[in-house]
Image (tube, grey):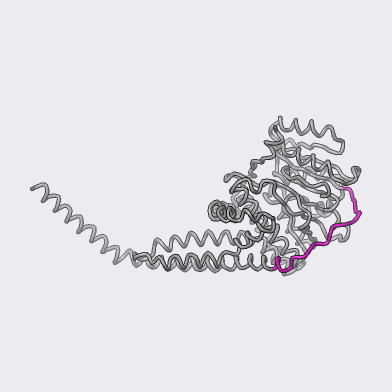
Amino acid sequence: MGLIETAQTLSTRWEIIVQKIFDQYQALGRPILDYVHIIFDDVFKIFLVVTVIASFLFLVMTIYVLINRRKEQELTGNYTPKVTVQIPTYNELVALRCAKACLNFDYPKDKYEILIGDDSSDETISDKILNFVQNYPIMKVLKREKNIGFKPGNLNNLLKHTNGEFIVIFDSDFVPPKDFLKRIVQPFAHDEKIAAVQAKWTFINQNQNLISILASTILNVYHYVTLPFIKKVRQISFLCGSAEAVRKSTLVRLGGWDSGNLTEDIEYSIRMLNSGYKAVYLPDLTCDSEVPYTPKDLYKQQMRWAYGVIYSIKKHFKKILFNHQTTLKDKTCVGIVVGGYLLAVSLAGLFSFGFLSLITHPPEPINWSILIYETLRNIIITSGLLISSIVATIQSENSRKLLPMIVSSFSYGLITTYYVNKGIFKAILGRPMHWFMLNKKGNELVGN
C-alpha cells in the first residue's frame, strides 16, 4: 500500500505542476502565439493575393492565345545567307545525333558550316566526336584547354571561328528537321532590327515517366502560352538557348555571350531589347529535344534556370526600368517571363505561412467543412497555371496524359517549387551556382 500511495502522491504533484505550466502558458504564451498567428495569417493572405494575381495572368494569357489562335503565315523565301551551325557539348555523345541531323539540312552545302564546341573532360567521348567529324569537310571540332564560362564561354570561343552571317545554335540533345535551316533564316531577310529567331521546342521523351511529363509540361506552357502571347501582343520573343538563330554582327556589337551566365539566352534577349533589337518566335517551326526523366535532373534544371533568369534580371534591372528605348510593353513582356518565378515564390510563401498559421491557431476542434471549403476555394482561385498546363498539354497533342500531368504537378511539382525558390534566392543573395549536367537518353542510344 505504501508504494501505491507514493505513486498516487507523485502523480497528483505532477498534475499540479503540469496545470501550473499550462496556466502560465495560457496567461503568457497563448497571447504571444495569438499575436504571432495574426501575423502569419496576414502574410498568408498577402501571398494568396499575389498568387491569385499571378494565376490570373496565366489564365488571361491562355484565353487570349486561344481566342487569337490563327494559322501562322508559312515561312517561304529563297533567302540563303551563310550560316554557321554551333553545337556546344560537354561529355555527351548525343551531340553526334544532332550533328547527323544537321548534315541532312536541305540547305546549300556551300552556304553553311557546322562547328562542335567540345568541352568534354572524357577523352574517349572527345575521340569519338573527332573521328566522326573527320569524315565531313563541312564540320569542325573546336576544343578549349579550359572549360571557362560554361556554355556561353564555349559559344564565345566558337564565335571567334564563325564564318557565317548568322549563327544557329543547338544543344547536343536536339534533333532538327531537314527544312529547319532554310526556314529559320527567312525572317532575317525582311528586317535589320531582327537580331534573333526562336523555334518551338518539342520533346522526344515527354511521355517516358511522370518526371518527363512534368518537365515537358513546364516547357509546353512557355512555348504554347507565354511566347505566343508575347508574340501576339508585341511581335517580339525571348531566346530559349537552343533551336535559335542569331545575327552574328549584332551579337558581336553587343559584346558576345555573357560568359558564366547559366541562362545566356535570357540575358542576351534582355540586352537585345534594351538596345533596340528584337527576336522573333516561330511557333510553326519545331525542333525535337529531350527533357529530364529523373527527379534529381528535373530539380537541378529548374533550379539552374531560375537562378540564371533572376541573375540576368538583377543584372539589367535598372536599364530595363529606366531605358527610354524600351517601351512599357517591352518591360511588361520581361515581367511576363519572370511571372512564372513570381508564382513559384508566392506558392512557397502560401504553403509556408499557411502551415505556420495553422499550427499557431488557438486549440479547438477542426471544422472539417470549413477546412475543405477553404482549401478547395484556394486551389480554384490559384489554378491559372494548372489551366495553362492543361491547355498546353492538349495543344501539344498529348491530351491522353492529362491525368498523369496533374498527378505529377501536385507531387513532383511541389518539390520542384522548392528547388526553383532555392535558385531564385541564391541569385538574389549573390550566391554562386555551377552548371549542372543532365542525363540524356540519347547518350545511351548513340553510345550503343
Residue 233 sits above or below residue 163 on the image: below
Task: Based on the picture, tell me whether residue 199 belongs to the magenta stretch.
Answer: no
Of all residues, the one furthest to the left in this rendering is 1
Residue found at x 24% / y 58%: 18
Q: Is residue 74 magenta?
A: yes
Q: Which residues are magenta?
A: 64-82
Image quadrant assignment for residue 439: top right
Quadrant location of residue 280? bottom right
Q: Position of residue 429 (x, y in %)?
A: 58, 54
Residue 379 in picture, x, y percent from top left: 53, 64
Q: Residue at x 70, y 57 (%)?
A: 223
Magenta part, dominant SS: loop
Q: Where is residue 29? Give x, y as percent.
A: 33, 63
Describe residue 36's horizontal placement relative to residue 191 as left or right: left
Q: Is residue 64 left or right of residue 108?
A: left
In the picture provided, is 247 more to the left or to the right than 404?
Answer: right
Relative depth, front residue between 41 and 29: 41
State the quadrant of the C terminus.
Answer: top right
Q: Position of residue 24 (x, y in %)?
A: 27, 63
**377 vs 248: above or below:** below
Q: How many marks?
A: 0
